[in-house]
Image: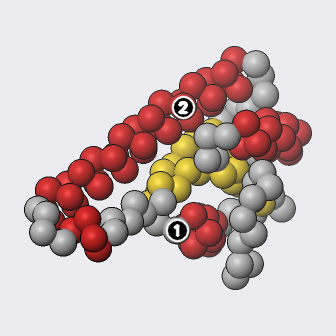
Amino acid sequence: MISNILVTDDGTETSDKAIYKAAEIANQMNVSLILLHVVNDIGVPASLILGNDKPAIEVARITIGEAIEKGWNQRADTIIEKLKKEGKIKSAQRFCRWGDASEEILRFAEDNKIDMIVMGPGKRLTGI
């Protein structure tokens, strides 16, 4: 029996379509919808670190990631509120993780006993 549907969101139009499809499925099945965004690790080229302030570069890298997470959380809250107002979902949660998208999606799904994952087209997940 399905009780949790996970939909991944990278902020694109394709993700928006996946979110609406997942909401439709969740509503029909009367189950919870979970939105997940993964902030990809922001790599810093070794050439940038060479001769520069490594701690300051690390702080900047984290600050950029936090800004991305904050922006996505606002986006997700807006989407969830809109879906609720339109009667497309009854309940939804949002989560944001950091790391490799494929790995984090699979880890999240396993850790949270996700029954179904809805995604737009993109990179193929390995390890399913």
Nearer to us in this view, 95 or 55: 55
Give the x, y percent position of residue 12. Answer: 67, 40
The mark nearer the N terminus, 2 or 1, is 2
Q: Quadrant of the C terminus?
A: bottom right
Residue 30, quarter of the rendered image? top right
In the picture provided, is 82 more to the left or to the right than 57?
right
Q: As drawn, which residue projects farthest toward the top? A: 85
Residue 71 location (% of width, % of height): 45, 35
Asked which quadrant contains residue 105, the reply is: bottom right
Q: Nearer the viewer, mark 2 or mark 1?
A: 1
In the depicted structure, whether residue 127 falls above or below residue 122: below
The residue sitting at 75% across, 58% down in the picture is 122
Residue type at mark 2: give it. Arg
- Left or right of 25? Residue 42 is left
In the picture, the disc for residue 100 is 1
Q: Which residue is mark 2?
A: 75
| Residue at the (72%, 65%) spot, across then down | 123
Q: How far apart are the two marked residues, 2 and 1, measured between alpha carbons?
A: 21 Å
Q: Residues within 10 Å of mark 1 (few under 14, many from 20)?
A: few
